[in-house]
């Protein structure tokens, strides 16, 4: 080992030399000692280090340890000097032939090192007091560990400390006792969160988006742009290019009253201005108004007077005749003028609003019941709004045979007057159809008169201005109620519809055309009393194109449905065809229709099959008068008939789910409420009964007798909060349904719950109903 010409220390090492401490596989640890400028200082530092080690060992080997304050003070003084010496040592480790500096870093803060040393000494002293009965070997090992921790660096810990769970990060350098620990834990922590004061001031209004609703004329440049934008919107939302999902749910919205483009007028401005009219201007104006009116009549009467004078007759005697002729001609022309008829209609509306304003406001639902009212009572009451009384024709009373509302305008309804019961002892010799408007309950706005009673009417669902009318002699005609002319659009003829039985029902059907076929107007079906169904189509001709769609046959044997005991007498039917009473179309399948007969059966038919039925279901022990599907389910329907019952059925089960019966009288009409999924209104000859299957199945919630005359038919208004009832006297009574329960938000859920509750005791029927599953409209909560 060579030297570099520097003095040698007492420990036998040369100052500034490199010493090999230990060797391993591929690595070598070297200790570089950085000598001081004075070799004597190195000797002294080494002596101090040796002396310190001996003293610390002796301190813990004695049976009586020294005082804590003296040991800490001495150790603190000696350690500061050792740290200064230790900063001159550099440790280098060779790894894979490269030198890596492994020198421990010095503690930058002396106060931090002082607290760390104090804690170590205090902890060691406490451990020594607790382990006085332990062996000297364990004490020495702990002493050596403590010494190594003190000599090794600021962040080195002994093996005993690591075993005892003492980590460097969890050390609190202030020495304290266990009592102080518990005292500090019991002290409440002060609230150190700060408070922020916020001042809100009104800012300027910024309009982010404005999209006003405008209407443009079709065919213009703006109209083409709007149509192109609408096609793009449909493509992105419901077409193949949709980019987001949508779902339909129940929602309660307010009724918004809108007007069409036909009634929109230009904004009128009023101002006070001065004007002057002379006598000459007044004379000219009056002369211009009178001259066209009397031009034709005056010419005729003047020429006739001139001829009479030439014949030698007295002109004074003929003067009165001339005046009467002028007046009669004037009245005839005035009554035939469309402008005069419209003027009378508008004047009648204005005068009628003075006496029927309260009923009109209630019919239009201007004041809806408040859901937050505390005094609500479910009384199921009916209030009379107004009465439509027609003027009798030919001085004979005619019953209300049918009522129908316009599909797009709930203020317009058509009432057919004629024969309701075909077993009546007296058949009226004439009939009529009046088109009424709620704006004028006193006078009809259209009147059509016939020489035979009217038995059925129906507005088109696809072209609302068309009205189909069925007559007692089997004839059918179609009229346009928007036209002021009294001429029908098309009528049936005997060559295509040879039947002569009364038409009892008419239903419009949606046209299912082929790809290469296009029809302007949808066809309709008419049911005759003899059991024949005829399909009519409107073509470019004054006559309807009709052909036989179906001819009913009597049911042989026992059909599905309720069981009817056979009669003890041997029946001998005089006619092999049953009597048709009503016709109903399916709410979803446009090619399916149902025919109701006097046998108590429902015949399910299709427009694609002309000679066979799809199904036959016996619903009543007697005639079936009405079949109506629920607005919230295309599978649930009700039927009423002459066996005093109202039954509720579901498609797929041949047993009735519910059976409602209260009085021993035939039920003429029954229908689901458009606003409540569990409310049914039925009409018999004397009363109107309101059923709520959610509350009571044994008796109706309310009974109302509207008039002394017998009831015939009834209809709900489009909103469902008014009921129109016709009677045999010819009056049509508008009634408001008040004190009704509030409409539930989830109509289908309430209907389903009421159904399962009603059949709770019949386990077999519950299993059959559960097997059907969801029986509502797909992706919809209601259909109106």
Image: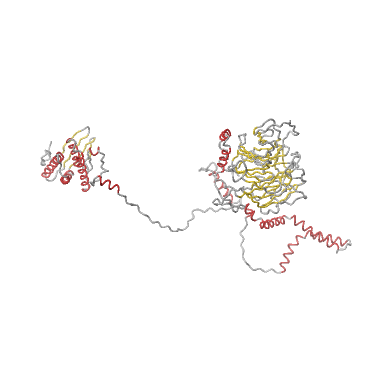
Structure colour scheme: secondary structure
All told, the count of numbered labels is 0
The one of 261 and 349 positioned closer to us in this rendering: 349
The residue positioned 54% from the left and 51% from the top of the image is 372
Q: Position of residue 713 (x, y in %)?
A: 68, 45
Q: Residue furthest right?
A: 312
On screen, residue 623 versus residue 103, left or right, reads right
Whether residue 585 is visible to the viewer of this picture, yes or no, is no
Q: In the image, 59: left or right of 282?
A: left
Q: Residue at x 77, y 56 (%)?
A: 332
Q: Quadrant of the N terminus?
A: top left
Location of residue 575 in the rendering, given as x and y in whole percent from the top left corner: 75, 34
Q: Tell me what residue is drawn at x 83 percent, y 63 percent.
A: 319
Quarter the C terminus occupies: top right
The foreground one among 345 and 316 is 345
Name the spot of residue 261 as percent of width and height, x first.
62, 53
Q: Identify whether 615 is placed above or below 676.
A: above
Residue 274 place in picture, x, y as percent: 64, 68
Q: In front here: 460 or 772?
A: 772
Would residue 195 be found to the left or right of residue 595 on screen? Answer: left
Quadrant in which residue 347 is drawn: bottom right
Residue 31, can we see it?
Answer: yes
């Amino acid at each position: 080992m060579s030297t570099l010409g520097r003095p040698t220390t007492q420990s036998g090492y040369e100052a500034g030399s490199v010493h090999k401490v230990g060797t391993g596989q591929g690595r070598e640890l070297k200790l570089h000692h950085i000598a001081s400028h004075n070799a004597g200082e190195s000797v002294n530092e080494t002596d101090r280090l040796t002396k310190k080690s001996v003293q610390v060992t002796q301190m813990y080997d004695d049976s009586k340890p020294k005082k804590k304050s003296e040991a800490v003070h001495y150790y603190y003084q000696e350690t500061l000097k050792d740290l200064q010496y230790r900063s001159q040592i550099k440790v280098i480790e060779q790894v894979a032939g490269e030198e890596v500096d492994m020198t421990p870093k010095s503690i930058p803060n002396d106060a931090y090192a002082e607290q760390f040393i104090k804690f170590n000494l205090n902890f060691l002293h406490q451990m020594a007091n607790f382990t006085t009965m332990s062996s000297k070997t364990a004490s020495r090992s702990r002493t050596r560990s403590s010494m190594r921790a003190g000599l090794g660096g600021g962040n080195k810990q002994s093996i005993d400390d690591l075993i005892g769970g003492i980590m460097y990060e969890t050390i609190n350098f202030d020495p304290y006792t266990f009592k102080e620990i518990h005292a500090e834990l019991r002290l409440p922590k002060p609230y150190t969160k700060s408070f922020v004061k916020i001042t809100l001031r009104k800012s300027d209004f910024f309009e982010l988006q404005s999209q006003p609703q405008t209407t443009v004329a079709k065919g213009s440049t703006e109209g083409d742009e709007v149509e192109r934008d609408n096609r793009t919107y449909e493509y992105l939302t419901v077409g193949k290019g949709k980019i987001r999902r949508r779902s339909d749910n129940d929602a309660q919205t307010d009724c918004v009253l809108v007007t069409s483009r036909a009634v929109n007028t230009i904004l009128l401005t009023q101002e006070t201005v001065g004007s002057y009219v002379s006598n000459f201007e007044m004379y000219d104006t009056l002369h211009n108004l009178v001259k066209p009116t009397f031009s034709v009549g005056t010419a005729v009467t003047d020429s006739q007077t001139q001829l009479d004078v030439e014949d030698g007759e007295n002109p004074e005697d003929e003067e009165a005749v001339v005046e009467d002729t002028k007046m009669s001609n004037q009245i005839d022309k005035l009554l035939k003028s469309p402008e005069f008829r419209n003027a009378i209609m508008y004047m009648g509306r204005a005068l009628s609003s003075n006496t029927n304003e309260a009923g009109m406001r209630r019919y239009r639902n201007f004041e809806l019941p408040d859901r937050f009212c505390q005094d609500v009572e479910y009384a199921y009451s009916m209030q009379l709004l107004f009465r439509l009384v027609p003027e009798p024709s030919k001085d004979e009373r005619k019953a209300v045979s049918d009522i129908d509302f316009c599909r797009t305008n709930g203020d317009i309804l058509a009432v057919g007057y004629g024969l309701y019961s075909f077993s009546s002892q007296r058949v009226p010799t004439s009939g009529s159809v009046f088109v009424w408007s709620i704006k004028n309950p006193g006078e009809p706005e259209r009147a059509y008169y016939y020489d035979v009673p009217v038995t059925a009417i129906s507005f088109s669902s696809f072209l609302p201005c068309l009205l189909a009318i069925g007559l007692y002699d089997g004839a059918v005609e179609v009229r346009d109620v928007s036209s002021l002319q009294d001429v029908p659009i098309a009528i049936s003829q005997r060559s295509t519809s040879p039947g002569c039985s009364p038409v009892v029902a008419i239903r419009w059907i949606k046209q299912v055309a082929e790809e290469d076929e296009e029809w302007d107007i949808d066809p309709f079906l008419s049911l005759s009393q003899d059991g024949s169904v005829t399909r009519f189509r409107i073509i470019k001709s004054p006559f309807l194109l009709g052909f036989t769609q179906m001819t009913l046959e009597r049911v042989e044997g026992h059909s599905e449905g309720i069981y009817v005991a056979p009669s003890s007498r041997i029946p001998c039917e005089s006619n092999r065809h049953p009597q048709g009473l009503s016709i109903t179309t399916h709410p979803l399948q446009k090619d399916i229709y149902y025919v109701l007969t006097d046998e108590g059966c429902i015949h399910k038919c299709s427009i694609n099959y002309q000679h066979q039925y799809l199904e036959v279901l016996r619903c009543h022990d007697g005639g079936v008068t009405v079949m109506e599907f629920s607005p919230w389910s295309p599978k649930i329907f009700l039927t009423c008939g002459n066996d005093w019952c109202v039954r509720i059925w579901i498609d797929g089960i041949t047993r009735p789910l519910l059976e409602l019966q209260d009085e021993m009288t035939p039920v003429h009409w029954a229908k689901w409420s458009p606003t409540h999924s569990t409310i049914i209104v039925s009409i018999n000859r004397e009363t109107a009964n309101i059923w709520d299957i959610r509350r009571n199945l044994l008796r109706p919630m309310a009974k109302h007798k509207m008039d002394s005359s017998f009831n015939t038919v009834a209809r709900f208004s489009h909103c469902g909060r008014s009921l129109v009832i016709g009677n045999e006297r010819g009056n049509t009574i508008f009634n408001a349904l008040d004190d009704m329960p509030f409409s539930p938000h989830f109509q289908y859920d309430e209907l389903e719950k009421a159904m399962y509750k009603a059949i709770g005791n019949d386990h077999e029927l519950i299993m059959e109903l559960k097997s059907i599953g969801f029986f509502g409209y797909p992706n919809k909560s209601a259909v109106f």
